[in-house]
Amino acid sequence: MNVSIAVVASTVLTFLAIPLGVAFFVFSLVAIYLRGYLVPGTPRFTKTYFPDWLLRKFDKHEPQTAEPKATDHEPEAVLAAANVVGPCEEMDDLCLNEEFRAVWHENMERVMEEGAEKRDLSRILGADESELEFEEHDSAFIAKIDGRRLGQWESRPSLIADLAAARELSDRYHQWDRLSIDNQSRILSGLRIFLDTCPECGADITIEQETVESCCRSIEVVAATCEGCDARILEVEQME
């Protein structure tokens, strides 16, 4: 919407003076790039009047969705088949296998001590370790090669947890390497909900419902966060 306004306004100004129209268009693009909009009040206006399906297309904040996708390898089924989770003894729910928990934490400590994030991730993705780069922002930990995004996690600790679990799952689940990267990612991120301490700082993990403000809308999420270092371990959009 803001780009369309910039185009129309710049076209009108071009009829008055070409340099003026060009200058306004450049200014508009810079403003939209830096703050996400040109017209003051755009975020409030769009959240109020635009339908949610349209806002999703422009949303930069993309938490995982709790709604399952059609697949032959649902996370719960894979983790149960690998003897990673099973029925709890004292409640009607799934609990983490204690033997797997111990191995998982050992693997996480190895990844951190060896600084093996790039090595382990490049092996999983079939990428060149020397070309792999990490970028860390307030709400994202991103892996790239030549500027191309290969994967994104909520934080460095969430990546460490996934790499450590993938190492063990490849031995426990004989079809693991046949799964697509997307399926592996869904299974690993779902497994993070069973973490009780932070892979990086060792603090307890709390699970809360939060409202996250993005560029275009307010999103209700279920978030798991390390109490000690405030690292986000998992963020899943709460479905109505």
Image (cartoon, helix red, strand yellow):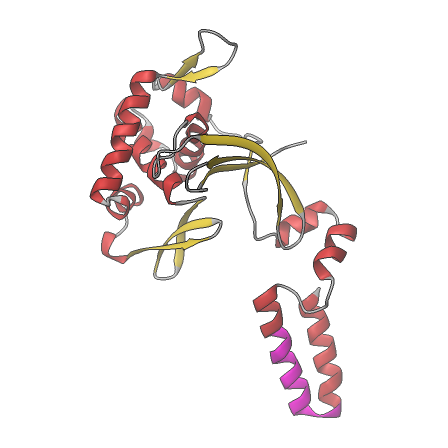
| 168 relative position to 10: left or right | left
Q: Which secondary structure class fits the magenta region best? A: helix
Residue 232 percent coordinates (x, y):
46, 41
Q: Quadrant of the C terminus?
A: top right
- Measuring from the top left, give residue 225's x and y in whole percent: 48, 37
Residue at x 31% of width, y 44% of height? 125
Q: Is residue 178 within the magenta segment?
A: no
* Residue 69 seen from this side: no
Quadrant assignment, res 3: bottom right
Is 23 in the magenta? yes
Is residue 151 in view from this perspective?
yes
Residue 151, placed above or below residue 25: above
46 or 101, which lies in front? 101
| 25 horizontally vs 147: left or right | right
- Give the x, y percent position of residue 21: 68, 85
Q: Which residues are magenta?
A: 16-29
In the orientation shown, which residue stands out farthest toward the top?
89
Number of marks in picture = 0
The residue furthest left is 114
Q: In the image, is 57 to the left or to the right of 145?
A: right
Q: Is 87 above or below relative to 37?
A: above
The quadrant in which residue 12 appears is bottom right
Which corner quadrant of the image does residue 238 belong to?
A: top right
**Which residue of the protein is positioned furthest toward the front in this rendering?**
228
Identify the residue at horizontal 57%, vertical 53% (top origin).
60
